[in-house]
């Protein structure tokens, strides 16, 4: 489907911008099946709840996250592994193999003024640290300017000397190497930064670097917005959690060997 030249072009754009869109990374059948399954989960829970051993629904005012779908539901894992996503992830990071880490859904209700995603980068909260922790953000609903499109600050992945404190962490914890998140909105308003707004079709994938700063405006549109996110580890990604890292109880302790997750829930795909 994608020639080697085309894949190399995706990797070149990624190296330059820290983010690249690949149209049609998931086919219509995958989009349909994932959408049905995710909608069923979201409708079943009106409050934050544990769905199964690892899977959780976290509800907030204006939306929900569903985390660790593939850990407990093989239908998600099978679709993911059979899709183009792992191979695209490897090509974009220019590595020979990728290890699947986790997946999640970012669901935003329609007609909201408040359910934005603030500017942040992933590395600030990932327990795996390294340059090769790639995110594939795949909308399952059509994304216009009103439907909370993902936005990326182009080239921001080149700033790797400091990690930004996650926007959810307003507590007093201080960790060396972390700084407060800059006022990107003011910098953008002054024309100092280039921002890409990823309006897209269901099944398109936006791949982005762990240091790439991204966010999304609220979903002011008429339909709920659903994005399916999977995260992929390249060679240099190692388990180094700190006090800002998101919880990943399922990957901890005995599943981590030499800094890498092991076992069937963390398959490695070699290209
Ligand atoms: O979908 C969104 O609004 C945010 C996604 C995100 O922050 C991520 O996948 O890291």
Image (cartoon, grey):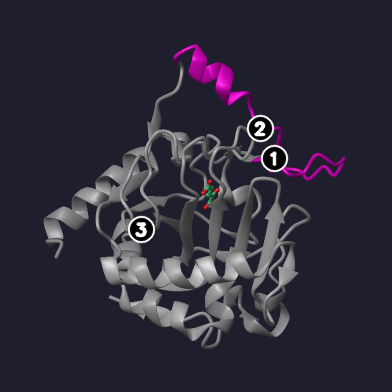
> What is the x, y in percent for residue 63?
62, 50
Above or below, 20 relative to 47: above
In which quadrant is the C terminus drawn?
A: bottom left
Instruction: Indicate the secondary structure of the residue bearing disc 2.
Output: loop
Please give the residue where the numbered disc 3 appears in the rendered image.
Answer: 93
Query: Where is 146 relative to 243, above or below?
Result: above
Look at 28% across and 61% down and name the residue there. 25
Find out whether residue 180 is within the magenta segment: yes
Q: Are marks 1 and 2 in contact (CB under 8 Å)?
A: yes
Residue tagged 1: 167
Q: Secondary structure at mark 3?
A: helix
Q: CA distance from mark 1 to mark 2?
A: 7 Å
Give the crowd class for mark 2: few <14, some 14-19, many >=20 residues within 10 Å: some
- In three-dimensional space, the C-alpha distance between marks 2 and 3, rounded to whole angstroms, equals 26 Å
The verdict on residue 185 being magenta is yes
Q: Earlier in the sequence, mark 2 or mark 3?
A: 3
Image position, residue 207 (x, y; %): 38, 52
In-image side of 245 versus 212 (left or right): right
Q: Residue at x 42, y 79 (%)?
A: 268
Magenta highlight: main SS: loop
| Picture coordinates of residue 197, whole percent (x, y) | 39, 34
Which of 163/62 is in front? 62
Q: Visible in this render: residue 86? A: no
The answer to whether residue 176 of the structure is visible from this angle is yes
**Quadrant position of residue 68:** bottom right
Residue extending furthest toward the right: 172
Residue 181 - label: 2
211 w.r.t. 129: above or below = above
Q: Which mark is residue 152?
A: none
Q: Secondary structure at mark 1?
A: loop
Numbered range of the magenta stretch: 164-191
């Amino acid at each position: 489907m994608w020639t080697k030249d085309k894949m190399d072009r995706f990797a070149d754009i990624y190296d330059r911008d820290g983010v690249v869109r690949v149209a049609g990374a998931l086919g219509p059948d995958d989009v349909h099946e994932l959408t049905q399954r995710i909608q069923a989960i979201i409708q079943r829970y009106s409050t934050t709840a544990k769905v199964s051993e690892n899977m959780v629904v976290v509800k907030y005012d204006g939306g929900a996250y569903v985390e660790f779908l593939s850990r407990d539901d093989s239908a998600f894992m099978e679709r993911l592994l059979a899709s183009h996503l792992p191979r695209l992830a490897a090509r974009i990071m220019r590595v020979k193999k990728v290890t699947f880490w986790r997946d999640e859904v970012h669901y935003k209700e329609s007609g909201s003024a408040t359910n934005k995603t603030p500017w942040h980068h992933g590395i600030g909260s990932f327990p795996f640290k390294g340059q090769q922790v790639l995110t594939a953000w795949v909308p399952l609903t059509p994304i216009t300017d009103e439907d909370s499109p993902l936005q990326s600050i182009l080239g921001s992945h080149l700033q790797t000397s400091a990690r930004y404190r996650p926007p959810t962490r307003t507590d007093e914890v201080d960790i060396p190497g972390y700084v407060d998140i800059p006022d990107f909105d003011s910098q953008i308003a002054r024309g100092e930064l280039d921002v890409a707004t990823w309006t897209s079709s269901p099944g398109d994938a936006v791949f982005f670097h762990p240091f790439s700063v991204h966010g999304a405006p609220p979903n002011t549109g008429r339909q709920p917005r659903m994005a399916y996110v999977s995260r992929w580890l390249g060679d240099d990604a190692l388990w180094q959690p700190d006090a800002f890292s998101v919880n990943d109880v399922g990957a901890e302790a005995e599943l981590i060997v030499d800094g890498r997750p092991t076992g069937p829930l963390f398959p490695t795909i070699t290209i």
